[in-house]
Image: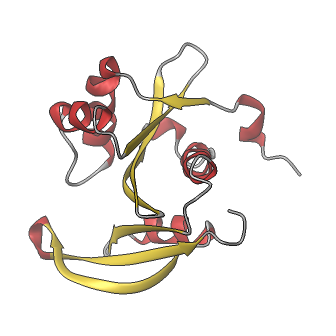
């Protein structure tokens, strides 16, 4: 059964240089350790980077996903959604889009803050499984839980 959020599905496309300020604002509002505008601009211009943006009806960024495609794997580096659009499937759509655009990838990996139960549950619902721990990985000494999703199953 389609979710209510599916009716107003955002359009997802590649980020453009002019998106960097908006992506930095989304990150600043959503993340403890957000990327800067310069950080987004650099990623948008990096060949192995995949920077996807979910856009609303007027083309405004509602969320983003940044990943690197390296050696047959997709490393998810950052994912955030505008507050009022969270829990409406935007993050799920971004992740599914990124995975679908890397058909040669055999696995997807990411790190998530050990103190962010909501993010961990989100990734678990999307078939990521905890595979390790990186002690004091994040600022403030917060551990990172490494998570992996095998993709040989067709995404």
Q: Position of residue 85 (x, y in %)?
A: 53, 38
Quarter holding residue 64: top left
Q: Residue at x 18, y 73 (%)?
A: 137
Q: Position of residue 53 (x, y in %)?
A: 47, 33
Q: Is residue 98 above or below residue 14?
A: below
Q: Is residue 36 above or below residue 145?
A: above
Q: Residue furthest left?
A: 140
Q: Residue at x 61, y 17 (%)?
A: 57
Q: Along the horizontal axis of the image, is 103 left or right of 5? A: left
Q: Residue furthest top?
A: 58
Q: Residue at x 48, y 64 (%)?
A: 72
Q: State the scheme by which the image is colored.
A: secondary structure
Q: Nearer the viewer, residue 57 or 15?
A: 15
Q: Nearer the viewer, residue 74 or 54?
A: 74
Quarter holding residue 145: bottom left
Q: How many marks?
A: 0
Quadrant for the C terminus in the image: bottom right
Q: Along the horizontal axis of the image, is 22 left or right of 63? A: left
Q: Is residue 79 above or below residue 28?
A: below
Q: Nearer the viewer, residue 70 or 149?
A: 70
Q: Position of residue 140 (x, y in %)?
A: 10, 69
Q: Residue at x 45, y 82 (%)?
A: 130
Q: Position of residue 55 (x, y in %)?
A: 54, 26
Q: Residue furthest bottom?
A: 132
Q: Along the horizontal axis of the image, is 3 left or right of 31? A: right
């Amino acid at each position: 059964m389609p979710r209510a959020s599916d009716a107003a599905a955002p359009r997802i496309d590649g980020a453009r240089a002019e998106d960097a300020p908006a992506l930095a604002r989304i990150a600043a509002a959503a993340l403890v350790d957000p990327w800067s505008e310069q950080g987004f601009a650099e990623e948008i211009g990096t060949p192995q980077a995949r920077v996807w943006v979910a856009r609303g009806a007027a083309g405004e960024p509602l969320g983003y996903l940044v990943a690197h495609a390296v050696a047959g794997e997709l490393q998810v580096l950052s994912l955030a959604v505008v507050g009022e659009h969270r829990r409406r499937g935007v993050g799920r759509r971004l992740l599914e889009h990124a995975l679908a655009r890397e058909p040669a990838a055999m696995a997807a990996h990411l790190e998530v803050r050990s103190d962010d139960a909501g993010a961990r549950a989100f990734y678990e619902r999307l078939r990521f499984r905890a595979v390790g721990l990186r002690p004091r990985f994040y600022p403030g000494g917060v551990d990172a839980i490494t998570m992996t999703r095998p993709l040989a199953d067709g995404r």
